[in-house]
Amino acid sequence: MRFVSSRDIRNNPAVLWKDSETVITVNGKPKAVVVRIEGDPKEILDFIERMRVQMAVEKLRMFSLEKGLNRLSEDEIEEIIREARKQK
């Protein structure tokens, strides 16, 4: 994997194709990943979306563990849901 600044890509776009994975940076911070594809682009994009969802679920799971929310009873969860619905 290679890190390339957006400025370098403007000056020489071919730099993206030197490696199979390239991380594009802006002001030194990663902003995007370019991956060489083999196969159907839609299948690859669907796979990436599934990975994003899995990452989001994992973040929620870790948040729950850190806050002790994993120890809530079913009744406590239902009460939280009722209160949230009332606020809408």
Image (tube, grey):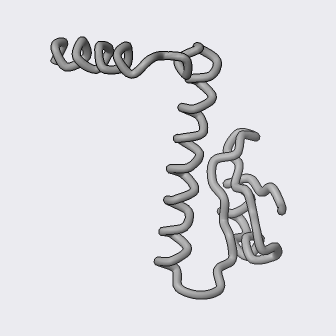
Query: Is residue 2 or residue 50 the one in the foreground?
Result: 50
Q: In which quarter of the image is residue 70?
A: top right
- In percent of width and height, residue 48 lies at 56, 62
- In percent of width and height, residue 46 lies at 48, 68
Left or right: where 10 falls relative to 80: right
Q: Quadrant of residue 34?
A: bottom right
> Residue 10, relative to residue 25: is it above or below?
below
- In percent of width and height, residue 60 lies at 54, 31
Query: Is residue 87 or residue 20 the one in the foreground?
Result: 87
Q: In which quarter of the image is the N terminus?
A: bottom right
> Residue 86, relative to residue 17: is it above or below?
above
- Residue displayed at 37% across by 13% down: 76
Query: Is residue 74 or residue 34 the one in the foreground?
Result: 74
Q: Which residue lies furthest to the bottom in this view?
A: 39
Query: Is residue 8 or residue 86 the one in the foreground?
Result: 86
- In percent of width and height, residue 20 lies at 77, 74
Left or right: where 81 falls relative to 54: left
- Residue displayed at 58% across by 24% down: 63
- Residue displayed at 75% across by 63% down: 22
